[in-house]
């Protein structure tokens, strides 16, 4: 039987980065014959200031706000190899259980009750399955994975971006792409120097936290090409119902969610430059044009009424440079129009920049600044404290919200 030591496990299921400290890498130890254990942690100590406009247009400080320490990701990874073809992987994750709180500003300037029903850290930590799959590696052109496995697009972008430990990719942050899902995937690479690679999955569509049996499976796919060693081009396509169509509502009027993705990335002599573009139709919409709260399902309604059709589109660009073997600088800029058909003024602009230092091969630290502004309504973003969500924006379509964070970020593997 073949022994397989997990020297470098990409948390997103991606290929290794050009320089070790640019990508989330976990280092594992061998427990016995063909079994390894590893882990990965993302954490930070930072100050956050979030101000959202209330109904009177007055900025009000909103949770999460203040200084704190967060552990945003904690993966434990177990890999076992049966033979030269078959292997299995279990990756668990942990986060704080969440609780909804609500506060009201009763000052003469208006209330903030529409904005302060936040998802915040609770008193219990839950452990859940991120990935659990059986893999059959028949050859480099065809690898079969069954279970909860790495999704086709977001982890692919993470590998090109290289700074997942600083923040999620744009479609992941906005809730428009899963990083893993339950289903069956075929992946592989072929051609001279594996110039072409692909990933095609038939998935439940609800993400790794929701293995609900669905009426139909979704299509999750990607095709990429590396014509030269320093250039990567990729396209992705998603089509389905996001795990929301079951036997009980299959006769209701419904929409189909589709997402088209594109990526161009360059890695050369310590320089990384790249960008992705997406168009996501019917993933989410707003509750009403006047309130402009983004996040309502566009797939199916509980009442049986026809769901509203809506589309989001945006892009993300990034650049980083390793000016020594240990020091690097990085920056990123995202822009998204969240509701092109209903609340056309609803936009999200995000950027970050910082400097990183590789203390050890498996230990990285960075000084980071982040800024995000939502105008023309509000939305919920996956991130901030303890990987919880935060609402950013105004109490109506005339309002706005601004999120600022600066602090020290850390990743380490074992």
Image (tube, rainbow, N blue to C red):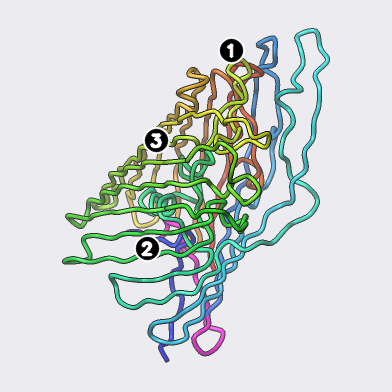
At 45% from the left edge and 59% from the top edge, which residue is drawn? 202
Label 1: element kind: loop
Numbered range of the magenta stretch: 19-35
Labels 1, 2: front one: 1
Image coords of residue 322 (percent x, y):
34, 50
Q: Quadrant of the N terminus?
A: bottom left
> For mark 2, does the 10 Å Cα neighbourhood hold few (<14), some (14 to 19), or many (20 or more) residues?
some
Image coords of residue 158 (percent x, y):
42, 51
CA gap between label 1 and label 2 equals 45 Å
Image coords of residue 351 (percent x, y):
46, 33
At 66% from the left edge and 44% from the top edge, which residue is drawn? 388
Q: Quadrant of the C terminus?
A: bottom right
Residue 390 in which image quadrant = top right
Q: Which labelled disc corresponds to residue 365?
A: none
Residue 263 in which image quadrant = top left
Q: Is residue 224 above or below residue 254?
A: below
Along the viewing direction, whichever of 407 and 97 lies nearer the viewer: 97
**N-terminal-most mark, 2 or 3:** 2
Does 79 appear in magenta?
Answer: no
Label 2: element kind: loop
Question: On the image, numbered disc 2 is attached to which residue?
Answer: 16
Residue 401 in which image quadrant = top right
> For mark 3, does the 10 Å Cα neighbourhood hold few (<14), some (14 to 19), or many (20 or more) residues?
many
Label 3: element kind: strand
Question: On the image, numbered disc 1 is attached to which residue?
Answer: 398
In the image: residue 102, left or right of residue 269: right
Question: On the image, numbered disc 3 is attached to which residue?
Answer: 279
Furthest residue in direction front, as rendered? 251
Labels 2, 3: front one: 3
CA gap between label 3 and label 1 equals 25 Å
**N-terminal-most mark, 3 or 1:** 3
């Amino acid at each position: 039987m073949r022994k397989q030591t997990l020297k470098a496990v990409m948390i997103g299921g991606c290929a290794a980065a050009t320089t070790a400290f640019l990508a989330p890498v976990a280092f594992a130890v061998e427990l016995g014959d063909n079994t390894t254990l590893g882990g990965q942690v993302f954490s930070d100590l930072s100050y956050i200031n979030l101000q959202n406009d209330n109904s009177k247009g007055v900025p009000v400080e909103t949770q999460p706000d203040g200084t704190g320490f967060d552990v945003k990701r904690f993966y434990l990874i177990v890999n076992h190899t049966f033979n030269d073809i078959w292997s299995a992987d279990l990756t668990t994750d942990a986060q704080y259980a969440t609780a909804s709180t609500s506060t009201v500003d009763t000052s003469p300037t208006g209330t903030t009750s529409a904005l302060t029903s936040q998802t915040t850290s609770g008193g219990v930590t839950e452990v859940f399955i991120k990935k659990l799959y059986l893999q059959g590696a028949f050859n480099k052109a065809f690898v079969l994975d069954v279970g909860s496995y790495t999704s086709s697009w977001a982890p692919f972008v993470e590998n090109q971006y290289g700074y997942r430990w600083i923040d999620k990719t744009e479609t992941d942050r906005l809730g428009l792409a899963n990083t893993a899902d339950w289903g069956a995937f075929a992946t592989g690479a072929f051609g001279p120097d594996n110039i072409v690679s692909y990933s095609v999955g038939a998935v439940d569509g609800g993400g790794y936290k929701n293995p609900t049996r669905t009426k139909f499976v979704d299509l999750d796919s990607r095709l990429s090409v590396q014509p030269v060693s320093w250039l990567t081009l990729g396209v992705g396509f998603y089509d389905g119902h996001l795990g929301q169509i079951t036997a009980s509502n299959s006769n209701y009027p419904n929409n189909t969610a589709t997402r088209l993705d594109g990526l161009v990335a360059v890695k050369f002599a310590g320089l990384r430059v790249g960008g992705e573009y997406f168009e996501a139709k019917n993933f989410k919409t707003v509750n009403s044009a006047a309130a402009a709260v983004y996040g309502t399902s566009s797939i199916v309604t509980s009442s049986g009424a026809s769901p509203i059709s809506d589309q989001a589109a945006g892009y993300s660009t990034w650049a980083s440079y390793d000016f020594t073997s240990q020091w690097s600088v990085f920056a990123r800029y995202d822009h998204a129009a969240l509701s092109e058909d209903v609340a056309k003024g609803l936009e999200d602009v995000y950027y970050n920049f910082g400097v990183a230092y590789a203390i050890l091969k498996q230990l990285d630290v960075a000084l980071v600044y982040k800024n995000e502004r939502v105008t023309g309504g509000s939305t919920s973003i996956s991130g901030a404290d303890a990987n919880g969500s935060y609402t950013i924006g105004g109490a109506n379509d005339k309002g706005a919200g601004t999120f600022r964070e600066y602090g020290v970020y850390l990743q380490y593997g074992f």
